[in-house]
Amino acid sequence: MSNEKTMAVAVAEQLARLRDDYLARLPAELTGLEALASGLSGSEIDRASLDELYQRLHKLAGSGGTFGLAALSVGARSLEQRVRGWLAEPLDAVDVQARQTFAQDVAALGKTLSEANAMASATLPDKGASAPGQCIQVWLVEDDALLGQALGRQLESFNYVVRLFTRIGDAEAAAQTERPDMLLMDVMFEQEGENSTEVFTLHPNLRALSCPLLFITAQDDFQSRVRASQLGAEGYFLKPLEVPRLVNRMVQVLEKLRAPSQRVLIVDDDADLAEHYRLALLAAGMEAEILQQPAAIMEKIATFRPELVLMDMHMPDFSGPDLAGVIRQHDNWSSLPIVYLSAETDLDRQIEAMNRGADDFLTKPISDAQLVAAVRIRIERARYLDEQINRDSLTGLLKHASIKESAGIEVIRARRSGKPVTLAMLDIDHFKVVNDTYGHAVGDVVISSIAMLLRQRVRQSDIVGRYGGEEFVLVLPECGAKDAHLLLDDIRQRFAAVRFSYAQKDFTCTLSAGLACSAQHPDSNGAALLVAADEALYVAKRGGRNQVRGGQLDLKGAQP
């Protein structure tokens, strides 16, 4: 085993031991917190007890998500913010009923822990990827505490762990030692004893954070938008906020940051030059391989699956146009971008070569920076076009035909590997009522919200598609029925917690789901397994909706 692999294994083992130790200590910590919170139920409370509660809840909120207990972090964070609010006001203003409710909520953290452990077993690790449902740390800097808390609860439904700062100074201090995955900021703050202050002109620590920045504001003037652009803001959202639209942008930004490396195949008979190109692309974060035998180009494409072919035009045995013509003979690769990189300067010959299957022509010599920029923009454009062809425009999920094809492929792969695959059908309950009551524009917001939630909660190896209307399909490779049930029920509960707004009124929606596992239908192909999942969904609908059916376990929610 290589040193790198040995180190990776050792680190993984150390992390596992740390998590085990943390889980072993956690019950005692929760018991201590419960005892401390119970002491607040009397007629008087003291600031020292509140300070200790605040510090311990703050620590728990930070550590829970680190060790994979997202729900525990969310619960502790909410309680921490409640205590912080009490500390900011006279203690005699905190009534007994509020303290008793708080003690009950602290005691409920134990249930959150058991649910989080169940989800840990339900969400399987992806191959070489982050764990599914990995929490994203979001800092929300908003001086309107009530708005900040409400927005934080909404974002938590989409699997974000939100840390609210109502004072810019607190956020700036935290930025000296910590770094979130994303920063949401109001443009204007009411400073104590001062007039409103623009975030745009202050806080170098926050501006220096190397994470995506989105602004939320009531200001819609051109100058503010220009300043936001100059600061590199990824979004500018006006109050009152449309939370699903905000979350959609957050998902887009994070997906772009975590997109897989671009893959380039280099075909050039000059070995030294090809290696130079390869190293230049590797240095830019791409994957690049060199084809040594042009006659094996289709085999190489099938195994490496490049997103762009960078090809010399003149080579000893086969010309670039010859190889481009062979690639275009294969339907699967008819849209693969092919770019000639050649010393040919004759414009007529360049045009003639491009007419034989290529997309563009770059002339040698070319600087590394120009090569990287040319390759990157062409691959990004190809990815965008592929999404437009194969993905639903509203949700960004695979279209009906593509998800059906993926389901069939994964069922075949599961049969070969002997590992299960589970297919799930999800449907929004009473969606016609939503459209009839609030209009199709609001219905689109509901559909896009569940799509975002699905993308947040599944693994990178899972496949999600919009089957039609308000119906969705999940393909869960290497996932049995029990784990799929727990995952789907978590999604069901989170979706029910999302609040939608129309005409200054809030409403919620629920979903029903049915699943079918290949382990229980060993002779079924993808189409048959989808039918079985659809039948389970029908059972869930007939059983009262807002529930998960199919397999060996039924999970029901509160009836709508």
Image: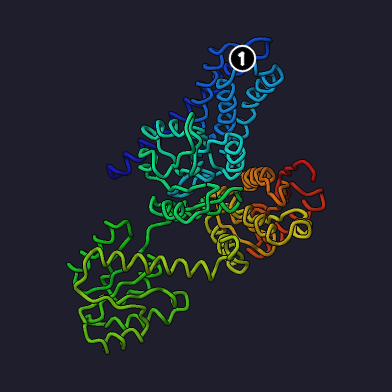
For the N terminus, the quadrant is top left
Please state which of residues 77 and 489 is positioned toward the viewer in this rendering.
Answer: 77
Is the residue 46 above or below the residue 353 in the image? above
Residue 57 in the image: x percent, y percent? 54, 24
Colouring of the image: rainbow
Q: Dot 1: few (<14), some (14–19), or many (≥20) neighbours within 10 Å?
A: some
Residue 435 in the image: x percent, y percent? 75, 59
Q: Residue at x 71, y 43 (%)?
A: 553
The residue that mark 1 highlights is: 35
Residue 196 visible (yes or no): yes
Residue 17 in the image: x percent, y percent? 43, 29
Is the residue 521 above or below the residue 357 in the image? above
Please state which of residues 537 and 57 is positioned toward the viewer in this rendering.
Answer: 57
The part of the image, by quadrant, that contains residue 119 is top right
Looking at the image, residue 1 sits to the left or right of residue 181; the answer is: left
Label 1 residue SS = helix
Residue 117 visible (yes or no): no
Q: Residue at x 61, y 15 (%)?
A: 91
Is the residue 4 above or below the residue 534 in the image? above
Please state which of residues 106 and 148 is positioned toward the viewer in this rendering.
Answer: 148
Is the residue 233 above or below the residue 102 in the image? below
Marks counted in the figure total 1
Residue 110 in the image: x percent, y percent? 62, 26
Q: Residue at x 22, y 80 (%)?
A: 315
Looking at the image, residue 212 sits to the left or right of residue 57; the answer is: left
Looking at the image, residue 358 sits to the left or right of residue 145; the answer is: left
* Residue type at tag 1: Ala
